[in-house]
C-alpha cells in the first residue's frame, strides 16, 4: 500500500460523472458510479468528485447519498450556487463543495466561475457551507483577480481551470501551451501565498498532466472524463493506476 509523504504527495480526485452518463443512456442501474468510485479508490484515487447538475444529466440525487455513505475517501460535491444545491449539500455534508458555473446548454463546464462579478451572490452560499464544516472550493480561471476575490470571499480552496491549456495541447499550439502552463504556475503561486489550497483540473490527460503535476503549490488534481474514456479500452483500475504513476513521476522530478 502507498504511504505518501503528505508534504509531497499530489492527491488525485477522480470524477465519476461520466460513468453515470453511460448508465443514463440506457436507464437502469448499470454501470454503477458508486462501484466506479470504489474501484477508483482501490486503484489509487485519494478522493471522489461528482457534479450534481440541475438537469441530472449524469449524477443523480441518490448517487450523492450513496457516495457519502459508501466510499472510504473524501467526497468533493461539485455544484452550482443555487438554493436547491445548497439544501442538498447541507443535508449530505460532503467533505468539500466545489462551486462551479453551470449552464443547461453546455456539454461540460465552460471556464471558471466569475467570482469577481458574482461575489455578492456567492457570499451567502459560501458562508452557509462553511458554517456546517464543509470546505469550500471555487473553480476559477488561473487569474490573479479571481484568486484575490476567492480569498476575500473566504474560500478554502481554488481549483484552477486547466481547460485552455489542454485545448492548446490538442491543437499542437506549442507557444500557447507554454503560455498557459506559465499562467497556471503563476496563479498557483499567488493562490498559495494568499493562503488558499490549490487544486487544478479540466481536460487533463496522460499527455498534459505532467507540467501541472510538477507545480509544487498544486496539492490535488481532479480528473474524470479522460479516465472514464480510457477505462473503455483497458479498465478503470489500469487507467487510474497509469495516471497515478505519471503524477508521482512528475512530482518526484
Image (tube, rainbow, N blue to C red):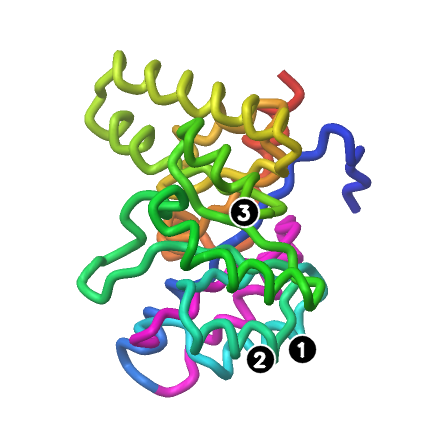
Q: Secondary structure at mark 2?
A: helix
Classed neighbour count for the residue bearing mark 2: other residues with Cα under 10 Å, few (<14), some (14–19), many (≥20): some
* Place of residue 114 in the rendered image (x, y in percent of width and height, measured from the top left): 35, 46
Classed neighbour count for the residue bearing mark 3: other residues with Cα under 10 Å, few (<14), some (14–19), many (≥20): some
* Place of residue 234 in the rendered image (x, y in percent of width and height, measured from the top left): 44, 51
- The residue lying toward the viewer, choosing from 176 and 226, is 176
The residue carrying mark 3 is 153
Disc 1 + disc 2, Cβ < 8 Å: yes
Residue 204 lies left or right of residue 158; in this view the side is: left
Q: At 42% from the left edge and 70% from the top edge, which residue is drawn?
A: 52
Asked if 203 appears above or below 192 in the picture, the reply is below
Total marks in image: 3
Magenta range: 28-56
The residue carrying mark 2 is 65
Q: Secondary structure at mark 1?
A: helix
Classed neighbour count for the residue bearing mark 1: other residues with Cα under 10 Å, few (<14), some (14–19), many (≥20): few
Disc 1 to disc 2, how far (Cα)? 6 Å
Q: Is residue 75 magenta?
A: no
Q: At 73% from the left edge and 28% from the top edge, which residue is drawn?
A: 8
Disc 2 to disc 3, how far (Cα)? 28 Å
Asked if 123 appears above or below 161 in the picture, the reply is below
- Closest to the camera, between mark 2 and mark 3, is 3
- Closest to the camera, between mark 1 and mark 3, is 3
User: The C terminus lies in which quarter of the figure?
Assistant: top right
The residue carrying mark 1 is 69
Q: Can residue 233 be seen in the rendering of this structure?
A: no
Amino acid at each position: 500500500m502507498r504511504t505518501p509523504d503528505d508534504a509531497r504527495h499530489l492527491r488525485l480526485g477522480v470524477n465519476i460523472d461520466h460513468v453515470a452518463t453511460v448508465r443514463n443512456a440506457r436507464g437502469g442501474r448499470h454501470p454503477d458510479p458508486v462501484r466506479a468510485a470504489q474501484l477508483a479508490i482501490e486503484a489509487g484515487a485519494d478522493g471522489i468528485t461528482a457534479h450534481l447538475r440541475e438537469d441530472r444529466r449524469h449524477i443523480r440525487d441518490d448517487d450523492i447519498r450513496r457516495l457519502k455513505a459508501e466510499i472510504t475517501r473524501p467526497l468533493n460535491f461539485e455544484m452550482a450556487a443555487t438554493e436547491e444545491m445548497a439544501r442538498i449539500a447541507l443535508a449530505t455534508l460532503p467533505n468539500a463543495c466545489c462551486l462551479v458555473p453551470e449552464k443547461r446548454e453546455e456539454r461540460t463546464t465552460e471556464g471558471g466561475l466569475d467570482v469577481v462579478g458574482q461575489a455578492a451572490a456567492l457570499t451567502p452560499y459560501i458562508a452557509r457551507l462553511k458554517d456546517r464544516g464543509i470546505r469550500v472550493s471555487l473553480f476559477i480561471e488561473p487569474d490573479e483577480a479571481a484568486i484575490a476575490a476567492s480569498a476575500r470571499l473566504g474560500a478554502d480552496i481554488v481549483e484552477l481551470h486547466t481547460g485552455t491549456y489542454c485545448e492548446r495541447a490538442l491543437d499542437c499550439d506549442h507557444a500557447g501551451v507554454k503560455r498557459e502552463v506559465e499562467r497556471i504556475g503563476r496563479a498557483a503561486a499567488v493562490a498559495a501565498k494568499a493562503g488558499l489550497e490549490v487544486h487544478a483540473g479540466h481536460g487533463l490527460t496522460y499527455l498534459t498532466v505532467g507540467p501541472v503535476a510538477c507545480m509544487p503549490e498544486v496539492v490535488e488534481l481532479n480528473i474524470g472524463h479522460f479516465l472514464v474514456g480510457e477505462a473503455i479500452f483497458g479498465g478503470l483500475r489500469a487507467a487510474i493506476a497509469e495516471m497515478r504513476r505519471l503524477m508521482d513521476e512528475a512530482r518526484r522530478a
